[in-house]
Image (cartoon, rainbow, N blue to C red):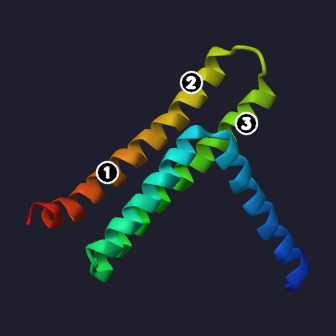
């Protein structure tokens, strides 16, 4: 296998594809927009409460987990719709499991958020 050299142009093209994918998902997925708004709220609250580094790290990881799972879920849904445009119980299961991953990630993020912010709000 031939080793490929780094090329700025191809790296920039890949970056543009990734940004385009995020924009497509953001425009097409209401839940991703909800997560984006929640992210802005959490970041604002983190600044307001002047969080220590460790709490910022935990919140950023939780946010990343949710956004990444939502993007993967969206990609799976788009692919499933191409593979099987007609109603298919197996495709339905695939979509449900992908959605469950987002739900689980969201619950973990909510738990992290509560653990970080509740002590600050209650004091």
Q: Which residue is mark 3?
A: 78
Q: Are marks 2 and 1 in contact (CB under 8 Å)?
A: no
Quadrant that contains the N terminus: bottom right
Under circle 3, the secondary element is helix
Q: Nearer the viewer, mark 3 or mark 2?
A: 3
Q: Earlier in the sequence, mark 3 or mark 2?
A: 3
Does residue 4 show up? no
On the question of residue 67 being in view, the answer is yes
Judge whether 53 appears above or below 24 on screen: below
Foreground residue among 14 and 35: 35
Residue 25 spot, x, y in % from top left? 68, 47
Q: Is residue 21 above or below residue 52?
A: above
Image point 30% across, 78% down: which residue?
A: 54
Residue at the spot of label 1: 110
Nearest to N terminus: mark 1 or mark 3:
3
Answer above or below: position of 93 versus 9.
above
Tell me, yes or no, whether the two marked residues, 3 and 2, touch with CB atoms within 8 Å: no
Q: Are marks 1 and 3 in contact (CB under 8 Å)?
A: no
* Of marks 1 and 3, the one in the foreground: 1
Q: Which mark lies nearer to you, 2 or 1? A: 1
Q: Position of residue 6 (x, y in %)?
A: 85, 85
Crowd class of label 1 (few under 14; some 14 to 19; many from 20; radius 10 Å): some
Give the percent coordinates (x, y) of residue 102: 48, 43
Q: Position of residue 112 (x, y in %)?
A: 28, 58
Disc 2 marks which residue?
93
Disc nearer the start of the sequence (2/1): 2
As rendered, which of 57 and 83 lies closer to the eye? Answer: 57
**In front: 90, or 35?**
35
What residue do we see at 80% from left, 30% from top?
82
Q: Residues under labels 2 and 1: Cα distance?
A: 25 Å
Q: Is residue 49 left or right of residue 59?
A: left
Location of residue 15 (image quadrant): bottom right
């Amino acid at each position: 296998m031939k080793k490929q050299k780094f090329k700025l142009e191809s790296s920039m093209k890949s970056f543009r594809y990734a940004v385009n994918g995020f924009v497509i998902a953001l425009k097409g997925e209401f839940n991703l927009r909800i997560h984006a708004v929640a992210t802005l709220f959490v970041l604002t609250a983190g600044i307001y409460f002047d969080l220590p580094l460790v709490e910022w790290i935990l919140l950023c990881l939780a946010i990343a987990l949710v956004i990444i799972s939502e993007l993967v879920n969206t990609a799976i849904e788009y692919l499933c719709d191409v593979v099987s445009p007609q109603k298919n119980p197996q495709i339905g299961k695939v979509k449900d499991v992908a959605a469950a991953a987002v739900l689980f990630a969201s619950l973990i993020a909510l738990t992290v958020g509560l653990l970080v912010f509740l002590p600050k709000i209650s004091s």
